[in-house]
Image (cartoon, rainbow, N blue to C red):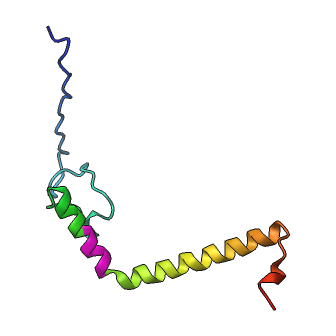
Amino acid sequence: MGVFKTKKNKKYNYMPRYWEGEGSPFQLEQRFDKYRNTVGQNKNLKQKVNAAWDDLRSDSEYAQATNRRVFIIAIVLILLFLYLINFDLSIFFP
């Protein structure tokens, strides 16, 4: 009575005949996993959060440059929007 059992996927472990490398050439891994601290050995949520926090603090110069860039882009877009709706920009200037 396999009504409530879930069907398991079949495994197919193909290895090419002339492959001389390590592992399978078809193994998928993320592009930037080797540069991340949060991927790999961390098993639980607390370790992942601590690793992400340490990674964020170590790249603080990059984060500051990114924040500054986002702030400048937001200001330019707001001023462009105000210009497009014909807002009186003379209140900002004496």
At x 24%, y 50%, the residue is 27
Asked whether residue 55 is in view, the answer is: yes
Residue 34, by quadrant, is bottom left
Q: Residue 29 placed where, x, y %? A: 27, 55
At x 18%, y 26%, the residue is 8
Please tell me whether residue 9 is drawn above or below residue 70 in the rendered image: above
- Residue range highlighted in magenta: 52-58
Quarter of the image with the C terminus in it: bottom right
Q: Residue 53 placed where, x, y %? A: 27, 71
Q: Is residue 27 magenta?
A: no
At x 14%, y 56%, the residue is 43
Q: Is residue 43 left or right of residue 58?
A: left
Residue 64, by quadrant, is bottom left
Q: Is residue 54 magenta?
A: yes
Q: Residue 60 placed where, x, y %? A: 36, 82
Magenta span: chief secondary structure: helix
Please tell me whether residue 46 is drawn above or below residue 64 in the rendered image: above
Nearer to the camera, 50 or 2: 50
At x 83%, y 83%, the residue is 90
Quarter of the image with the N terminus in it: top left
